Image (cartoon, grey):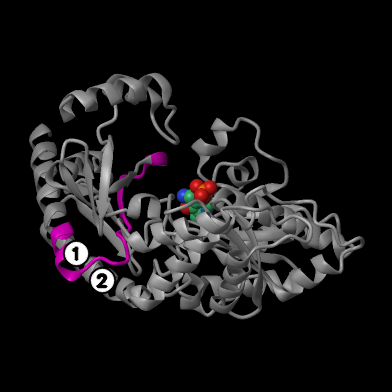
C-alpha cells in the first residue's frame, strides 16, 4: 500500500473512531486530519506524506527539548525494564519519584520544597485547589474556600480547572462550573484587592495565575504586578498559586517565569516541559509551611492521590529531561533565541501592515493581526489564514481567535538555533505578505 492510500485509510478511521481533544469535530468530519505526523527531529516534524514543518509551538508549549531524543526513550526503557510502576500510596515509594521530588525542590525558588505528583496540568490545578482548602481547614479556617483566578487565564479541563479558567467558552461548555471560583481582570492588582475586600479575605483560600497567560493569547503583565499580588495575598492570608505549566522549565528565559519578578508563590504547578511531552507528568510544588500543616494534620491522612502519582517511568524521564535542559543550557538559549525571535517580530511589524502588537519573553511570543487602515481587528479573524499559508510553506504556528482575538502565538522548542529562528521568521514573513495581499484585494 502506498503512503497516499495508507493516509486515506487512516483518515477514515480517524473520522469514525477518534474524538479529538479541544477540536472542531465537525471540521474533522468534513475535512479529515490535515496532518498525520510520523516523525520528529529537533524542531521539525514530518507527516505521512513526507511534508516537513518547522514546529514553532513545541506542540502544546511542551516539547521543550525538541523531538527525537533517544536519551529520553532510553530512560523510559531502562526504568520500565526494572520497574515501570508501583503505586506511591501509604508508605510505598520508588527511586525516580524520590529523586525527582528532591530535584524539583532544589530547582524551585525559596521555600518550595515538597512535591505532589500528578499526570498533567489539569490534575495539578485540581490538586492545588483542594490542598489550598485543606490547608485552611487544618488551620481552623474551613470557611476559606474561594479561589480567585484571572480572566483569559487557562488552567485545564477538569471540573475545578475549567472553573478556574477565565476563557468564557470553556466555562460555557461545562454548563455548571464548580462553586467558589471567582475571576478578576488579568493585570490589575487594584482590582484583585477590591474583590478581596468585597468578598471578605476570610472566605478566600487562594489566588491563582499563570505568570504569562498562554492559551489566552500570551498576555504578559507589567513589571511589578506579581510583586503587588504577592503583597496583597500575604496581607490577606491568601495562598498564591503560580500555574507555571507552560512557563516552567525555561520557556521564558528563566527556569521558572516568576523568577523574573523575584516572586516566590506558595504553590507552583508544573507539567508539560517537566518531561518535554515524552511521557505524561505533572507536579504541585508546595511551600514548607503547607507541607508542615499537611503533615501535622489531625490524623495526618491525605485523602487525595492519583494511581499515577509518582509514576516511576514518568519520573525517570523527567529526571533525564531536566538533565538535558541543564546540560545544554536551554534556559539561556531560550533567553537569547527568544530575544532574536522578538526582534524579528518587531521588524515584521515595520514591514507588514497587517501586523499589530507583538510581544514575548524568552521563547514564548505573540503577534496581533490588524486591519492596516483602521488599526483594529478584521471583522473575521485573519490569523488562521496566516497559519494555513505558513503550514503550506513548512511552518506550524497556533492561533488564538476566541472572544474577538486575532493572534498568532509562538513557543518553539528551547533547542532552536539562530538559523532556525531565521527560517521561522522568513516563512512567517512570506505567509503574512501572501495573506495581506489576499485580504486587501477583497476589500
Ligand atoms: N495550566 C496551563 C497554564 C496550561 O497551559 C495547561 C495546558 N495547556 C494546563 C494547565 C492543563 O494541563 P493539561 O492539559 O496537561 O491537563
Q: How many numbered discs sit on the rendered protein?
A: 2
Left or right: 349, with 360 as reference point: left
Query: As rendered, which of 242 and 250 lies closer to the eye?
Result: 250
Left or right: 204, with 314 as reference point: right
Disc 2 packing (10 Å; few <14; some 14–19; many ≥20)? many
Left or right: 258, with 7 as reference point: right
Query: Which span is picked out in magenta?
Result: 402-425
At 54% from the left edge and 61% from the top edge, which residue is drawn? 315
Question: Among all residues in the image, which is located at the extreme right?
Answer: 298
Q: CA distance from mark 1 to mark 2?
A: 7 Å
Query: As rendered, which of 245 and 319 lies closer to the eye?
Result: 319
At 61% from the left edge and 64% from the top edge, which residue is drawn? 97
Element assignment for label 2: helix
Tell me: residue 8, above or below residue 96.
Answer: above
> Is tag 1's residue or tag 2's residue first in the polypeptide sequence?
2
Instruction: Assess whether mark 2 and mark 1 are in contact (beta carbons under 8 angstroms).
Output: yes
Task: Report whether residue 147 is seen.
Answer: no
At 15% from the left edge and 47% from the top edge, which residue is drawn? 394
Task: Read off the residue under disc 1.
Answer: 421
In the rendered structure, find residue 337 and report the number of the disc placed on it.
2
Q: Position of residue 337 (x, y in %)?
A: 26, 71
Residue 183 forms part of the magenta stretch: no
Element assignment for label 1: helix
Amino acid at each position: 500500500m502506498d503512503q497516499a492510500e495508507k493516509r486515506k485509510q487512516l483518515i477514515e478511521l480517524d473520522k469514525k473512531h477518534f474524538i479529538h481533544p479541544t477540536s472542531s469535530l465537525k471540521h474533522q468530519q468534513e475535512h479529515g486530519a490535515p496532518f498525520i505526523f510520523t516523525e520528529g527531529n529537533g524542531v521539525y516534524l514530518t507527516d505521512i506524506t513526507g511534508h516537513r514543518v518547522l514546529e514553532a509551538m513545541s506542540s502544546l508549549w511542551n516539547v521543550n527539548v525538541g523531538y527525537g531524543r533517544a536519551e529520553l526513550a532510553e530512560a523510559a526503557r531502562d526504568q520500565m525494564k526494572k520497574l515501570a510502576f508501583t503505586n506511591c500510596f501509604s508508605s510505598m515509594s520508588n527511586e525516580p519519584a524520590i529523586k525527582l521530588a528532591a530535584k524539583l525542590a532544589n530547582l524551585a525558588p525559596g521555600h518550595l520544597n515538597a512535591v505532589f505528583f500528578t499526570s498533567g496540568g489539569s490534575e495539578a490545578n485540581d490538586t492545588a485547589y483542594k490542598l489550598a482548602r485543606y490547608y485552611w481547614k487544618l488551620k481552623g479556617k474551613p470557611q476559606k474556600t474561594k479561589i480567585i483566578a484571572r480572566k483569559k487565564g487557562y488552567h485545564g479541563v477538569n471540573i475545578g480547572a475549567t472553573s478556574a479558567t477565565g476563557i468564557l467558552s470553556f466555562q460555557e461548555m461545562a454548563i455548571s462550573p464548580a462553586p467558589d471560583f471567582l475571576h478578576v481582570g488579568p493585570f490589575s492588582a487594584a482590582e484583585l484587592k477590591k474583590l478581596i475586600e468585597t468578598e471578605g479575605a476570610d472566605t478566600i483560600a487562594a489566588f491563582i495565575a499563570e505568570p504569562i497567560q498562554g492559551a489566552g493569547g500570551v498576555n504578559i503583565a507589567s513589571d511589578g504586578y506579581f510583586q503587588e499580588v504577592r503583597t496583597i495575598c500575604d496581607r490577606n492570608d491568601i495562598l498564591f498559586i503560580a500555574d507555571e505549566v507552560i512557563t516552567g522549565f525555561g520557556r521564558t528565559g528563566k527556569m521558572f517565569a516568576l523568577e523574573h519578578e523575584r516572586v516566590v508563590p506558595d504553590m507552583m504547578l508544573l507539567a508539560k516541559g517537566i518531561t518535554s511531552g515524552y511521557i505524561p507528568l505533572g507536579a504541585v510544588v508546595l511551600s514548607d509551611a503547607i507541607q508542615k500543616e499537611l503533615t501535622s494534620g489531625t490524623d495526618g491522612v491525605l485523602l487525595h492521590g492519583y494511581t499515577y502519582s509518582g509514576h516511576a517511568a514518568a519520573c525517570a524521564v523527567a529526571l533525564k529531561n531536566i538533565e538535558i535542559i541543564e546540560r545544554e543550557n536551554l534556559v539561556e538559549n531560550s533567553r537569547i533565541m527568544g530575544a532574536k525571535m522578538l526582534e524579528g517580530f518587531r521588524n515584521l511589524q515595520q514591514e507588514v501592515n497587517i501586523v499589530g502588537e507583538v510581544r514575548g519573553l524568552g521563547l514564548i511570543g505573540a503577534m496581533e493581526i490588524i486591519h492596516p487602515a483602521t488599526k483594529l481587528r478584521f471583522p473575521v479573524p485573519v490569523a488562521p489564514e496566516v497559519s494555513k499559508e505558513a503550514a503550506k510553506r513548512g511552518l506550524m504556528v497556533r492561533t488564538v481567535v476566541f472572544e474577538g482575538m486575532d493572534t498568532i502565538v509562538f513557543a518553539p522548542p528551547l533547542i532552536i538555533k539562530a538559523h532556525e529562528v531565521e527560517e521561522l521568521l522568513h516563512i512567517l514573513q512570506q505567509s503574512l505578505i501572501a495573506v495581506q495581499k489576499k485580504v486587501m484585494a477583497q476589500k
